[in-house]
Image (cartoon, grey):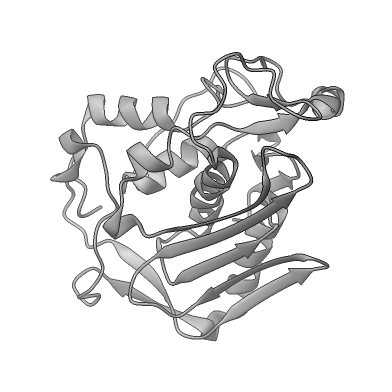
Amino acid sequence: MRNVARVSYATSLMKKGVLISTTEHLLSALAATNLDNVHVELDNLEVPIVDGSALPFVRLIAQAGLRRQRAWRTYAKVLKPVEVVDGSKRMAIYPSDAFRITYRIAFPHPLIGEQELEFTPARANYEAEIAPARTFGFFEEIETLRKSGLIRGGSLENAVVLTRDGVLNPEGLRFRDEFCRHKILDVFGDLALMGHPLVGHVVAERAGHAMHYALVARLWKERNAWKLVNSAELEQARPLHTPAAALAASQAS
């Protein structure tokens, strides 16, 4: 978490003067496949956007396979509610026996409007239901993003671009609520900054990268709001859904 440099349109990390942008999709795939010991090599300043989702990363992880290690995975189990609020934006986490996310968004656009989705990894399939959801943005924001050093390779092949009343992408949407699903994808990646998988119910309303990070920062400040437990102690903890080829190997770090 100490390496977070920027959390506006994307989550950027910095260490020893080196800045890496748009890390959230890769982090999301790593968290959702229970891959918590990995060495990533990059030859540029931004993680490849690929198709704008986490699906290519999930498939590559499944193709490579995972190796079980001789260590218990350590979880951060939430003991009491923690909340951050910024105007109409709100994000909180509550005690729960398993990790789950409830995300609500609202955009004044005919294809978005108000959307809400609850996702419980232990009962659903991240690869099929969340990973394919692409990043999205509004046509009028493109120039601002490029001036910020983001979306250098941005195109209709790696993002959903919204016009005033539709999308520019000829293939349309992958899900009717693709926008809300992508927000859940992002929160998986941003909450990985906690350093431990969370056990709690995350509720986000009109949030984004900055709010995701703010919740993690608040959790670290309120150290009595959670405790570390390992998989042996956490009897009801279940592994996140992973690609079939990786599932059996992903239950311990």
Q: Is residue 88 above or below residue 149?
A: below
The answer to whether one can see residue 21 in this image is no
The residue most toward the left is: 248
Q: Horizontal and vertical percent for residue 138?
A: 77, 30
Q: Estimate the x, y position of residue 149 in percent, counting from the top left.
A: 78, 25
Q: Between residues 1 and 244, which one lies in front from this camera angle?
A: 244
Q: Is residue 190 left or right of residue 72?
A: right
Q: Quadrant of the N terminus?
A: bottom right
Name the one closer to the observer, 170 or 36.
170
Q: Horizontally, is 92 left or right of 99 in the view?
A: right
Front residue of this view, candidates 153 and 195: 153
Query: Can residue 75 be seen?
Result: yes
Q: Residue shown at 16%/34% (left/top)?
A: 245
Measured as percent of width and height from the top left, residue 21 is found at 65, 33
**How many numbered tags mark residues here?**
0
Q: Residue at x 49, y 29 (%)?
A: 174
Residue 246 appears in which quarter of the rendering? Answer: top left
Looking at the image, residue 127 sits to the left or right of residue 209; the answer is: left
Q: Above or below — where is 64 with respect to 133?
A: above
Q: Which residue is located at x 18 percent, y 72 percent?
A: 232
Residue 194 coordinates in the image, percent (x, y): 51, 60
